Image (cartoon, coloured by chain):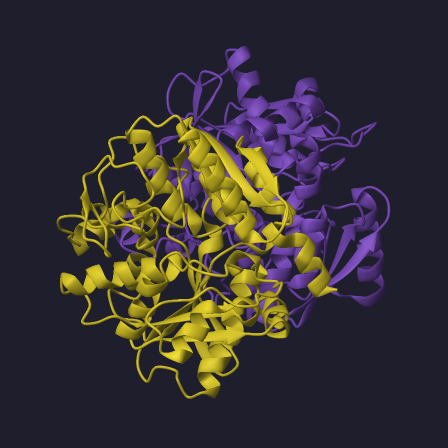
Chain colours: A purple, B yellow
Amino acid sequence: MFCCPACHARYAWGYLSHQCQACGGPLDFALERVAFPLQAIRARVPEFWRYAEALPVFEQPVTLGESLTPLAPCSIGTTQVLLKCEYSLPTGSYKDRGSALLISYLHALGVQEAVEDSSGNAGASLAAYAARAGLRLKVFCPASASPGKLLQIRLYGAELVPVEGPRPKATEALLEYVARTRAVYASHLWHPLFIEGVKTLAFEIAEQLGWSLPGAVLCPVGAGSILLGLHKGFGELCQVGVLPRLPRLVAVQARHVSPLYQAFVRGDQEVARALDPQPTLAEGIALPVPVRGRALLKAIRESGGAVVAVSEEEIAAGVKQFGQAGFCVEPTSAVVWAGVERLAQQGQLPARGPVVAVLSGHGLKAAQAMSQLVG
Amino acid sequence: MFCCPACHARYAWGYLSHQCQACGGPLDFALERVAFPLQAIRARVPEFWRYAEALPVFEQPVTLGESLTPLAPCSIGTTQVLLKCEYSLPTGSYKDRGSALLISYLHALGVQEAVEDSSGNAGASLAAYAARAGLRLKVFCPASASPGKLLQIRLYGAELVPVEGPRPKATEALLEYVARTRAVYASHLWHPLFIEGVKTLAFEIAEQLGWSLPGAVLCPVGAGSILLGLHKGFGELCQVGVLPRLPRLVAVQARHVSPLYQAFVRGDQEVARALDPQPTLAEGIALPVPVRGRALLKAIRESGGAVVAVSEEEIAAGVKQFGQAGFCVEPTSAVVWAGVERLAQQGQLPARGPVVAVLSGHGLKAAQAMSQLVG
């Protein structure tokens, strides 16, 4: 069931638009009930589909093999952190969780053709799952996106539409195309089934911790689908009593494009468009305004979390520090290194429970930028 | 226990040379006994360390989070194949299985510094695990290796020594360095603990098939560590009665560098150096002579297997066909697409049991070459 958090309109399974027909806002999705039969889950194949009672049911799920991603220990300064290595998913980013569900949904409805806009990773991920489902996909991307991501989109057989200018130009071009052609917009930014997939990240973390609560979870935030997925997933685990409460959810932004940080610091209820976005190494989160700003602020505050913003120097240092610890992550993911340091400096680390940081994407996706950083 | 298959010399745990002191040959490694407590294994963390009773014991294993890799279905022509997606390992290639064990061993012995030669993937993998263990590593690589692999080596903090000329030049430069400095040679080509790690690939495939036998397993072969690892792993499963026999092991080589293929076709017992190796897209298997040629031929024949050699056109087509099926693999891995087709054409597909093909490395490692192929 899809419902609009703004105007409370409801739409049944099978609804295809990316937004509320009544008010134009983004929709939420909720199953009637979720369950976590822990013993049964443990005996199932170690991939995210094992949380079957908390996911929509598809007769033919579209899958590329979504093994549980590692939770690997690493020292960041004097803080012991567990790194959730999402780059080990099929296309090298966490987006595969959302793509698997969204493409399974479109496939189940018989959709043959769809469009998407992306800074690169979501486009690559949707392209792979679309290839798997035999669905034609057109992806609007900034022409300046990392060559590795653009290569993946073309390799998987999607049609790549490079758009000159900053990230929002790609969205503008896509919306114009959608208005003209009535194409199905398979939007990782808008479609609630994308977040529905990403919530499995929370289930995995909880299971890997023996169904116990992390103290805090840090993640890069642009559109915020990781954070909203974590909020939904941990929320469902609380709802059925598996966990006692939410972990602190900490959003990390690049200071150069930090609308959520600014809104959080000001105590706002909505996220206003970043006034003066600057170019950033963290291309995956260079979004001047998130679609679900209100929901993000609410989720972070409800969890007792925080938002931190890190500099370009810190992002560059993070890439190298993760590398020297054995982890090859793209600059967008590397923001969490300085994020952990910032929490430690501010005495904001949780008193109890492990600190988890989400490594959202593979370093090889941004090999050129990485090469310059490594020198 | 290390032992020499040629002269039967034996060496105890703690032996550090990469070769037999008596005859200079490559060594084998064997545990005194192996066991597979299937119920217990199933309840353990889904990573290859779960096969603990069939692996050497380390007090402090060096790990980056080695989740079970997916076994994903794919149609190759009219053949249904299961793809073992090794690119989802921490550094993006199957080498992590061997590196985890080899570096754990060196770390346990207090080794502080080591050297390695590699076409790229093994160097990147060893560099990551060395970083994790705090071990200094120097990697000799062809200067022409894929930029992505060279980037990873530097990112992980290893010292990269680029060597002009074809792959064997890197080995020559390394051997000269080892002779001069007595450095520890952490060789993925020579060290039997590398193969000891790769054997877990067989354990995973067997477990993912419900501890049943695949009909055939295809893999790219240069030095042959995947094939020898499969042979050892499936062999141990037979030894304790979990499986009734070996699956057919099928080596796939690039026709341009195909010494094993030539030896197999001629019915030889040893693999002679390829007479006229040509440049190939499959850089990871462009080795004119394998260290363990005799063992490779024996393993393939014992399993009722085969060797096929594929053309550059077939490798290029394989990259694109895997891509359009949703899998982003480097050209070295893409050889198995034509390998499956060849078996099908020759009526050599097994009558019973699934066909498994090993996808050894991530496509993003070879992004430049891939870009040219995708066009």
- Which residue is located at x 32 percent, y 45 percent? B19
Q: Nearer the viewer, residue A163 or A207?
A: A163
Residue A311 seen: no
Quarter of the image for residue A155 reads bottom right
Looking at the rendered image, the quarter that the C terminus of chain A falls into is top right
Image spot of residue A268 (x, y percent): 69, 24
- Which residue is located at x 41 percent, y 54 percent? B69
Q: Nearer the viewer, residue B23 or B361?
A: B23
Q: Is residue A29 left or right of residue A313?
A: left
- Which residue is located at x 70 percent, y 64 percent? B374
Quarter of the image for residue A73 reads top left
Looking at the rendered image, the quarter that the N terminus of chain A falls into is bottom right
Quarter of the image for residue A296 reads top right
Residue B216 seen: yes
Residue B85 vertical position relative to residue A212 in the rendered view, above or below: below
Image spot of residue B289 (x, y percent): 45, 61
Image spot of residue B40 (x, y percent): 18, 49
Residue A92 vertical position relative to residue B243 in the rendered view, above or below: above
Q: Is residue A342 left or right of residue B38?
A: right
Image spot of residue B176 (x, y percent): 48, 39
Q: How many marks?
A: 0
Q: Nearer the viewer, residue A239 or B36?
A: B36
Residue B150 vertical position relative to residue B233 in the rendered view, above or below: above
Q: Is residue A182 left or right of residue A38?
A: right
